[in-house]
Image (cartoon, rainbow, N blue to C red):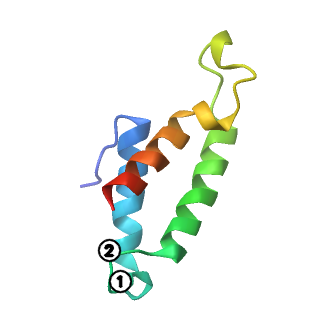
Amino acid sequence: MALQIHTYAALLQQIHHDLRTQHPEWVQQNGKSPMCDSYEARLMELLDASRPIESNENIGKGAENSETARHCELVKASR
């Protein structure tokens, strides 16, 4: 049975987990993974580009205020 993802944040977290599970050779001894980080960043760029604008207040604010950018900061802080 396939895992159901209900939120964008949950999708990003699942991708983060799955990349490290599927490619343990990319994870360094200290737990960091520049290769996984690179794949995640590129995928998030593509996902952000394909998402509809949620409200007019988001127009012109740039990627630094996106849900993806906030998730990236949370992931970095958890390492």
Residue 58 x/y as whole percent: 65, 19
Which element type, helix, strand or loop, lies under badge 1? helix
State whether residue 57 is above or below residue 20: above
Residue 36 x/y as whole percent: 49, 71
Is 31 left, or right, of 50 in this rendering? left
Residue 7: mark:
none
State whether residue 7 is above or below residue 42: above
State whether residue 11 is above or below residue 78: above
Is the C terminus in the top left, top right, bottom left or bottom right quadrant? bottom left
Residue 57 x/y as whole percent: 64, 12
Residue 21: mark:
2
- Residue type beneath disc 2: Thr
In contact (CB < 8 Å): disc 1 and disc 2: yes
Looking at this view, is 53 or 61 the one in front?
Answer: 61
Is 50 left, or right, of 73 in this rendering? right
Is the N terminus in the top left, top right, bottom left or bottom right quadrant? bottom left
The residue where tag 1 is placed is 24
- Crowding around mark 1 (Cα neighbors within 10 Å: few <14, some 14 to 19, many 20+) is few
Residue 23 x/y as whole percent: 40, 81
